Image (cartoon, grey):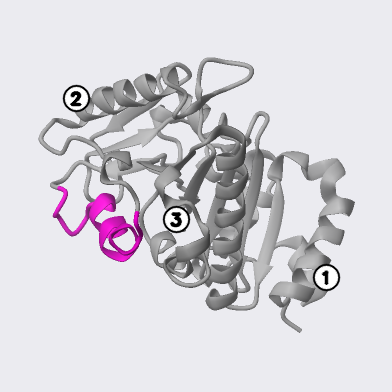
Amino acid sequence: MPITLNYGFLLMNQTLNLKMESHKDRGEVRIHENLDELSTDLADYVAELSEASVKERGVFAIALSGGSLISLMRNLCGAPYNKTVDWSKWYIFWADERVVAKNHVDSNYKLAKDHLLSKLPIVPSHVHSINDSLTAEEAANEYEFVIRQLVRTRVINVSDISDFPKFDLILLGMGPDGHVASLFPNHSVLEEKNEWVTFITTSPKPPPERITFTLPVINSAANVAVVVTGGGKAEAARLAIDGVGPECEGLPARMIEPVVGKLVWFLDNQAGSKLKSFSQFS
């Protein structure tokens, strides 16, 4: 019997309590019956974090990715969130971006604008996208500079244990190869320890030129959510959440381990079908 959102959520919590001894760094796993239930849960999660952050800091700094993640955030555009969320306090960033024109079909900015941002009353000056007239290296450097300036003014918080930015929420998708943001398996950028934003020009998935948050920035966030759907990503999800030893070495999704913050996985039944915890309740 598939795990449903409400009942399955309780079961997953019980399972995680049993698993926390060996999987503390893998966070909380939420498996949903279908995409509609996942979208509902994701909207609740984001809205709750927004409310808590605005209450505590007066702002909500959120970093998005591209892909199917944006369509799964669609519920935020409707009731009750369009009225209850304080959108004027939102500051939008991108955990990764393709180095293309903002109106290009491959642009993560265009995807978010068309399907999310244009439907919400977010202050335009609070939306921080890359400069699409620059090279990948220049765009990465400038984006890091912008983020550093906003850390100084505390629009973005700073980590309690380092000088890395502490975003209130970083939302990530995951590819069938286990990549997150534009951090691809066994790529040299996975070793970056100092830069906040870096670039690649040889992405294995087109377009080749991209900018991306580095692992230290992602792992310094107050909250990180990884949204994974579809059976084609089930094996990567298993490696990222349950995998041990050499089989998951070099897998970017496995390297998402918030130092102090909280990690939550949002999966549908298909993506979660190979997890140990899923088999106990299916």
- In the displayed structure, 59 sits above or below 81; it is above
Which residue is more in the foreground, 64 or 155? 155
Which residue is more in the foreground, 47 or 135? 47
Which disc is residue 20 wearing? none
Instruction: Please give the name of the residue rendered at 35% of the width and 60% of the height, measured from the top-left corner.
Output: 120
Badge 3 crowding class, 10 Å Cα cut-off, few under 14, some 14 to 19, many 20 or more, is: some
Of labels 3 and 2, earlier in sequence is: 2
Dot 2 corresponds to which residue? Answer: 138
Residue 243 % position (x, y): 68, 48
Whether residue 64 is visible: no
- Is residue 250 highlighted in magenta? no
Tag count: 3
Quarter where residue 12 is shown = bottom right
Instruction: Please give the name of the residue rendered at 43% of the width and 51% of the height, measured from the top-left corner.
Output: 87
Marks 1/2: CA distance? 49 Å
Badge 1 crowding class, 10 Å Cα cut-off, few under 14, some 14 to 19, many 20 or more, is: few
Which disc is residue 175 wearing? 3
- In the displayed structure, 42 sits above or below 92; it is below
Where are the magenta residues, as a range?
102-121
Of labels 1 and 2, earlier in sequence is: 2
Residue 89 % position (x, y): 44, 43
Residue 63 left/right relative to 140: right
Which disc is residue 280 wearing? 1
Which residue is more in the foreground, 212 or 243? 212
Badge 2 crowding class, 10 Å Cα cut-off, few under 14, some 14 to 19, many 20 or more, is: some
Q: Secondary structure at mark 1?
A: helix
- In the displayed structure, 81 sits above or below 138; it is below
Residue 272 left/right relative to 46: right
Q: Amino acid at mark 3?
A: Gly
